[in-house]
């Protein structure tokens, strides 16, 4: 059976993120936060299942449910706040979407948000802002950073660098497409802006 190297790298990348969060928990950074630890364990389990499918075959066993937007973002920010602090980065959430409820795979949605946050923390400046607002019948999540920190080395370039990087953004694009949404990333001198739009559930669809 032929296995896509890109798919395997994405699966490994998805596993690496929650394991990093669990490592922070093990070091005491998330002491007294069992909910966030439980979320990270669920994400790691989901990533392991995908890795198993990529290696051994099989279909995805995603569970689609109603997912409250604000708790989804708040939990992700808290999961990576310690990582941001170590990098000298401040995280801020600006919620302007009311009682927004998404329909989809909760683990997949959390993985997408996690990747946007960590990408901004690792490659952006000292201020990362997550803005959530309504866009038509969807939820728009905009993650912006304040530009590269002075003294930080430039991103590596070339074929080898492309092989090592970009898996997280591919995960975001895949999750957006699977949920009928869209993803855009823009770079400027003042920083980067990553925009993820996802359809919202109507009140009668929330169950």
Image (cartoon, rainbow, N blue to C red):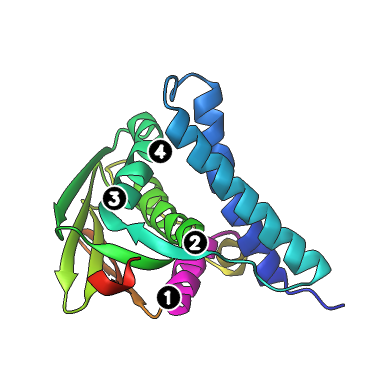
> First in sequence: mark 1 or mark 2?
2
Residue 149 location (% of width, % of height): 28, 44
Residue marked by disc 1: 179
Quadrant in the rendering for residue 99: bottom left
Q: Nearer the viewer, mark 4 or mark 2?
A: 2
Q: Quadrant of the C terminus?
A: bottom left
SS for callout 2: helix
Residue 173 location (% of width, % of height): 45, 73
Q: Which mark is residue 108?
A: 2
In the image, the segment drawn in magenta is 164-178
Task: Assign the magenta stretch its main secondary structure.
Answer: helix
Q: Is residue 202 above or below residue 120?
A: below
Residue sitting farthest toward the right: 1
Residue depicted at x 60% and y 47%:
44
Q: Are marks 1 and 2 in contact (CB under 8 Å)?
A: yes
Residue 13 location (% of width, % of height): 59, 55
Q: Which mark is residue 99?
A: none
Residue marked by disc 4: 79
Residue 61 seen: yes
- 107 vs 1, left or right, is left
Residue depicted at x 41% and y 49%:
118
Q: CA distance from mark 3 to mark 1?
A: 31 Å
- 19 vs 207, left or right, is right
Q: Are marks 3 and 4 in contact (CB under 8 Å)?
A: no
Q: Are marks 4 and 1 in contact (CB under 8 Å)?
A: no
In depth, the one of 59 and 17 nearer the eye is 59
Quadrant in the rendering for residue 57: bottom right
SS for callout 1: loop
> First in sequence: mark 3 or mark 4?
4
> First in sequence: mark 3 or mark 1?
3
Q: CA distance from mark 2 to mark 3?
A: 28 Å
């Amino acid at each position: 059976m032929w296995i896509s190297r890109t798919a395997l790298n994405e699966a490994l990348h998805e596993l690496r993120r929650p394991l990093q969060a669990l490592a922070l928990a093990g070091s005491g950074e998330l002491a007294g936060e069992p909910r966030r630890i439980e979320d990270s364990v669920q994400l790691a389990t989901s990533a392991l299942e995908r890795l198993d499918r990529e290696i051994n075959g099989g279909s995805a066993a995603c569970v689609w449910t109603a997912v409250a937007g604000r708790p989804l973002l708040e939990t992700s920010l808290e999961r990576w706040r310690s990582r941001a602090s170590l990098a000298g980065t401040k995280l801020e959430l600006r919620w302007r979407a009311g009682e927004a409820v998404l329909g989809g795979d909760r683990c997949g949605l959390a993985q997408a948000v996690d990747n946007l946050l960590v990408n901004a923390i690792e490659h952006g400046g000292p201020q990362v802002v997550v803005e959530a607002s309504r866009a038509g019948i969807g939820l728009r999540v905009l993650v912006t950073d304040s530009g590269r920190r002075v003294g930080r080395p430039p991103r590596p370039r070339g074929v080898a660098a492309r092989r090592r990087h970009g898996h997280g953004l591919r995960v975001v694009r895949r999750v957006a497409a699977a949920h009928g949404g869209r993803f855009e990333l823009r770079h400027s001198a003042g920083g980067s802006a990553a925009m993820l739009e996802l359809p919202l559930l109507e009140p009668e669809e929330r169950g």
